[in-house]
Image (cartoon, rainbow, N blue to C red):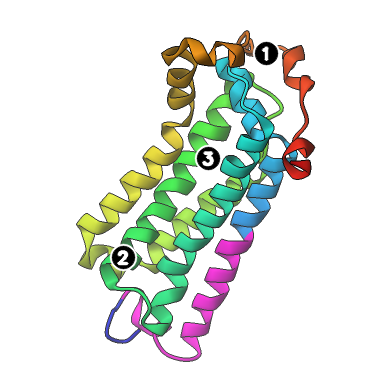
Amino acid sequence: MDEIKLVWSGLTNSPGRYLLYVVLGINLGLTLWHSVQELRGYLWRYFGAIVGFRIPDKLGFYIFFVGLWVGLWIIGFLGIGAPLHGFSTTKLAISCVGLIVGGRISDSIYSHIRLDRKGYRPNPALKTVPYYLIEAGYLTILFLPGIWSRPWFAALGFFLGWMLFFSVLPFLRWLRSISISLSRLSREPWQAGQSYPPWVQEYNYKEALNG
């Protein structure tokens, strides 16, 4: 950790370095909490209702819950935890930190805050958004020396994290429009300010667990 100065020097040695384990634990716990909240709110149904596209529960469960949860945990380990034991290079670690920060902000804005303000309510996991934004802020401060030392890698990670969540609804709208073979999945879009469309209630995420 001393060779790759990712964080303020006071945190590179004991007992300061143990704070990084706490930061990692918070990152992993917050990701899991947010993911579970989105699962309970059937995030894939929520997005599908907005664009008018029925996402099968099994697919939605594994992409929007399992995939995001596991993927963000791996990024958290690579960006925060792995450098403590020399398992991650400075460039990779800073890219992952940038991805976490960009993803937290983008997810908060495009998946939650904007949609809630447009009238698509209730929004899954909205209550965890403030914690996402707080984490984005203190990670930026904590890893600022590394960000300054590898600005292009930090910017690349931030961009990828931002685009990951910014592109979800446009991608689903594109999927809805590209093929007649997907027409059986097309539905009437959800009108902002109104209740969930009836078709959203036709299926249950437990199908994904039951196979």
Q: Are marks 3 and 1 in contact (CB under 8 Å)?
A: no
Q: Is residue 11 above or below residue 94?
A: below
- Residue 157 in percent (x, y) is at 32, 52
CA distance separating discs 3 and 1: 20 Å
Mark sitting earlier along the chain (2/3): 2
Mark sitting earlier along the chain (1/2): 2
Q: Is residue 79 magenta?
A: no
Q: In which quarter of the view is residue 188 placed?
A: top right
In terms of depth relative to the viewer, which is nearer, 195 or 47? 47
- How crowded pointer 3 is (Cα within 10 Å; few <14, some 14-19, many 20+) is rated as many
Residue 108 disc label: 3
Mark sitting earlier along the chain (3/1): 3
Q: In which quarter of the view is residue 186 placed?
A: top right
Residue 193 disc label: 1
Query: The N terminus lies in which quarter of the figure?
Result: bottom left
Q: Residue at x 45, y 55 (%)?
A: 137
- The residue type indicated by label 1 comes to Gly
- The residue type indicated by label 3 comes to Ser
Q: Residue at x 32, y 59 (%)?
A: 95
Q: Nearer the viewer, mark 2 or mark 3?
A: 2
- Residue 49 in percent (x, y) is at 63, 19
In terms of depth relative to the viewer, which is nearer, 117 or 185? 185
- How crowded pointer 2 is (Cα within 10 Å; few <14, some 14-19, many 20+) is rated as some
Residue position marked by numbered label 2 in the rendering: 92
Characterize the magenta stretch by its predominant secondary structure.
helix
Magenta-drawn segment:
6-29
In terms of depth relative to the viewer, which is nearer, 67 or 27? 67
